[in-house]
Amino acid sequence: AAEREISFFFPTECTLAVIKPDTSEELREEILGEIRAAGFTISWQKEMVLTREMAEEFYKQHRDKPFFSYLVDYMCRGPCTMLILSKENAVEEWRKMMGPADPSKAKETAPGSLRARFAKDVLENTVHGSSSSQHAQEKIQLLFGEISSESQVISTGDDDEPNP
Ligand code: IDP
């Protein structure tokens, strides 16, 4: 397939957030509500089931870790909610809201965080967030490369236009 170049412009910092497949629909809605209440703009939202290839590419930096195959299985198990979040300091703010990967650690150091409250264990930990702007751009390009033809922009309520 031909390589596609896709570039983005965001007026404020943005990050890629993922609500992982261990969440119920109810929990997803709750997390989306908390994201909005925390002042993030949801610039883009899409539910998708990752293929193994995409999950492997998405987490390629963990390729050599002993938990890699479990991580890929988990990420492909059901639909992920992919979100582009914008806000000042979005990368750091979203990482803070998630808490550390291991919920037992999260309960100690960040009891109000999403992972402290909702993660099952260090693998099934409910949410993902990019660790830098550059990582966010890379993963967004990966996801857009796969699904750009059917991508969906969700109105964020930041403009005066009524929803269609
Ligand atoms: P992060 O999600 O907070 O960035 P990373 O260390 O980058 O944490 O790990 C990526 C994902 O891999 C975690 O969110 C979790 O799902 C999984 N993971 C990390 N460490 C372990 C582990 O020790 N055992 C099983 N799964 C793990």
Image (cartoon, grey):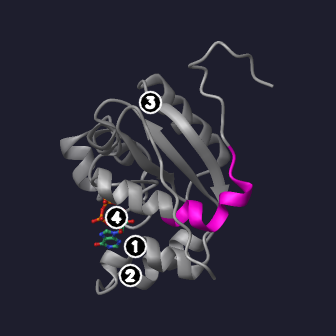
Q: What is the quadrant of the N terminus in the image?
A: bottom right
Labels 3 and 4: the sequence-earlier one:
3
Image location of residue 12, percent across then percent down: 37, 32
Specify start and end residues of the magenta stretch as a single range: 142-152
* Residue 150 falls inside the magenta stretch: yes
Mark closer to the observer (2, 3):
3
**What residue does disc 2 label?**
68
Badges 1 and 3: C-beta atoms under 8 Å apart? no
Amino acid identity at mark 2: Phe
**What residue does disc 1 label?**
59
User: Could you classify mark 3 by the number of other residues whose Cα lies within 10 Å: few (under 14), some (14-19), or many (20 or more)?
Assistant: many
Q: Which residue extends farthest left?
A: 109
Amino acid identity at mark 4: Val
- Which image quadrant is residue 32 in? top right
- Which image quadrant is residue 163 in? top right
Q: CA distance from mark 4 to mark 1?
A: 15 Å
Q: CA distance from mark 3 to mark 4?
A: 25 Å
Image location of residue 66, percent across then percent down: 31, 86
Labels 2 and 4: the sequence-earlier one:
2
Image location of residue 109, percent across then percent down: 18, 43
Label 1 CB-ligand 1 distance < 8 A:
yes
Q: CA distance from mark 2 to mark 4?
A: 13 Å
Q: Is residue 110 left or right of residue 31?
A: left
Labels 2 and 3: the sequence-earlier one:
3
Q: What is the quadrant of the C terminus in the image?
A: top right
**What residue does disc 4 label?**
122
